């Protein structure tokens, strides 16, 4: 064996199908999205209104059962504009952000649309933490988080 | 009462974007054999192994099985082996596991070893995307980079931190890495260079983001009696802990602060009897996978007030010549074999206390801090090492 022999590279891939149980809460939440309603759950103890819906409050450790309808508008809490292309991830540029909808105590992760992202200088002048956003719905809603196409600045 | 525990050997491996010169077991053997040699231990002197890695980055389920023979010299073939995976804190948790094993009184010498071949996955961001919620969030492409970018956007908005501040962090780490033979990125970087690298996810540029690295690291934890017999200057564990935060990052969108890290720091400083970390720590190895995080960590760890982190780097406080050098190794920003990176922080802190950090040695280190974060900015580990036992 000589040092000059180049090491071989063996290619492999993981291509494994899975199925994730969304649960009764997400199922209810997604069905409401078809009706253009955004729902959240209120904690009976600390009274926080939480989205995405989850089965218990992690602070109070009690089950959540009281559904609340949130507003279609909210406040931008944080954002980034991704310009890099990664295999299997969305085509850049896209603006990933967290919006706190009116009536909620937590923020929902989603995308921001209808702002030109090509010129970053212009885009970050337009997009500001604290700005008001509103939901834009898909025409064909299938009962999933992407029934909300994106959020856009309130004009 | 936990027993006194010290680190008697700390061995990171060389790292690169793909260590094609070694197989996975050879990479782990490199770390383990170096640690045994440093401690003057023979195969079989080790009582148990704590092993850290995150399988999907390696593309192998249970890589500890592939690498069990590389730990066999340390007794793994017929000894207990525990596998640890806690996201980016994997290496930090593996160090804690090694420490807890010995502190419990049930084992006298324990090998903590962590490995990751991020260079073997052709899309690390796709792996990181599988770590976020599959029902509500994964579709949006969220991963480590975009979450760090959210932290940066909030810090910019709240405190007026700038891209130039981030560049200063990167320049400092790149400069330090040039003195570390185990670093991955070892090239010169100026502020101008940094500001000219491509935008990855605003406001983070390429120079604000860690590379994907192949690497491993091994540390040997020993009981007081064994440590005193093996080493004139071991690194004593004088404070250690881990903390979790909630699953939904939208529940705590004030990303300019790292509240869970602040809470953990208070607990660990109390153990280590540290009142003023900036004055009492001699060196810190922080998990700065993204430049902005080092600034937020300064604040959360109490090196300065909230919002003043950028001032520390502007004033050179955390450079090699400053009051508290941060990441003499170049940090995670220059080297990131993800599951091993937390253990490398502990190893680097230990080498500083043991006086074995060679060209990156900070003179006269008596107390060193090692940190890691993981789980989509949800988990942290801290370990304080000292030249004197607790």
Image: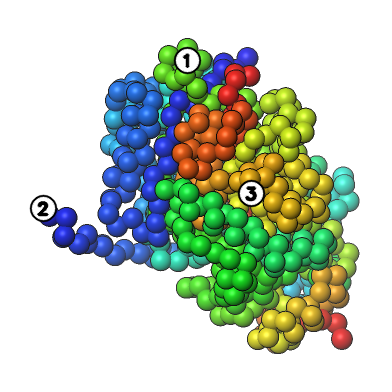
Q: Is residue A131 left or right of residue A149?
A: right
Residue at mark 3: chain: B
Question: Residue B47 is drawn in which quadrant?
Answer: top left
Question: Residue A2 is drawn in which quadrant?
Answer: bottom left
Does residue A53 appear in this view?
A: no
Q: Are marks 2 and 1 on the same chain?
A: no
Q: CA distance from mark 3 to mark 2?
A: 46 Å
Question: Residue A77 is drawn in which quadrant?
Answer: bottom right
Q: Is residue B138 left or right of residue B26?
A: right
In the picture of the structure, the residue carrying the numbered disc 1 is B228
Residue at mark 1: chain: B
The residue positioned 35% from the left and 64% from the top of the image is A13
Residue A34 lies, with reference to residue B339, above or below; the image says below
Mark 3 Cα shell of 10 Å, populated few (<14), some (14-19), many (≥20): many
Residue at mark 2: chain: A
Residue A1, numbered circle: 2
């Amino acid at each position: 064996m000589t040092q000059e022999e180049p090491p071989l590279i063996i290619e492999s891939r993981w291509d494994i199908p899975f199925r994730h149980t969304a649960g009764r809460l997400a199922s209810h939440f997604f069905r409401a999205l078809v009706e253009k309603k955004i729902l959240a759950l209120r904690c009976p103890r600390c009274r926080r209104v939480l989205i995405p819906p989850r089965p218990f409050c992690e602070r109070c450790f009690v089950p959540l059962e009281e559904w609340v309808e949130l507003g279609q508008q909210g406040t931008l809490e944080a954002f980034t504009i991704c310009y890099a292309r990664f295999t299997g991830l969305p085509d850049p540029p896209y603006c990933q952000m967290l919006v706190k909808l009116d009536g909620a105590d937590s923020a929902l992760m989603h995308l921001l649309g209808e702002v030109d992202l090509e010129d970053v200088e212009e885009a970050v002048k337009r997009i500001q933490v604290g700005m008001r956003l509103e939901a834009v719905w898909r025409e064909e809603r299938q009962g999933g988080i992407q029934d909300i196409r994106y959020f856009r600045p309130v004009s | 009462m936990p027993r006194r525990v010290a680190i008697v050997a700390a061995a990171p491996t060389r790292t690169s974007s793909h260590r094609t010169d070694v197989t996975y077991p050879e990479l782990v053997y490199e770390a383990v054999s170096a640690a045994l040699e440093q401690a003057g231990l023979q195969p079989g002197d080790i009582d148990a192994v704590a092993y850290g890695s995150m399988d999907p980055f390696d593309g192998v389920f249970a890589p500890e099985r592939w690498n069990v023979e590389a730990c066999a010299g340390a007794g793994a073939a017929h000894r207990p082996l525990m596998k640890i995976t806690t996201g980016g804190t994997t290496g930090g948790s593996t160090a804690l596991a090694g420490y807890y094993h010995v502190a419990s009184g049930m084992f006298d010498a324990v090998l903590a070893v962590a490995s990751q071949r991020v260079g073997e996955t052709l899309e690390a961001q796709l792996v990181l995307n599988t770590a976020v919620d599959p029902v509500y969030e994964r579709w949006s492409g969220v991963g480590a980079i975009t979450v760090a970018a959210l932290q940066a956007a909030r810090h910019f908005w709240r405190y007026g931190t700038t891209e130039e501040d981030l560049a200063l962090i990167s320049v400092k780490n790149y400069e330090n890495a040039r003195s570390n033979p185990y670093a991955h990125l070892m090239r010169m970087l100026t502020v101008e260079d940094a500001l000219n690298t491509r935008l990855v996810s605003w406001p983070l540029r390429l120079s604000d983001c860690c590379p994907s690295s192949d690497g491993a690291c091994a540390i040997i934890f020993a009981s007081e009696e064994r440590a005193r017999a093996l080493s004139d200057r071991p690194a004593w564990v004088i404070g250690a802990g881990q903390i979790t935060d909630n699953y939904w990052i939208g529940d705590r969108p004030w990303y300019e602060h790292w509240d869970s890290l602040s809470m953990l720091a208070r607990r660990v400083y109390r153990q280590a009897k540290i009142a003023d970390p900036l004055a009492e720590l001699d060196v810190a190895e922080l998990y700065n996978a993204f430049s902005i995080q080092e600034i937020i960590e300064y604040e959360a760890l109490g090196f300065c007030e909230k919002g003043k982190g950028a001032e520390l780097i502007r004033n050179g406080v955390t450079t090699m010549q400053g009051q508290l050098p941060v990441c003499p190794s170049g940090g995670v920003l220059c080297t990131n074999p993800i599951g091993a990176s937390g253990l490398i922080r502990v190893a680097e802190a230990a080498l500083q206390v043991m006086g074995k950090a060679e060209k990156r040695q900070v003179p006269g280190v008596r107390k060193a801090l090692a940190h890691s974060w993981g789980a989509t900015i949800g988990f942290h580990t801290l370990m304080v090492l000292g030249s004197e036992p607790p």
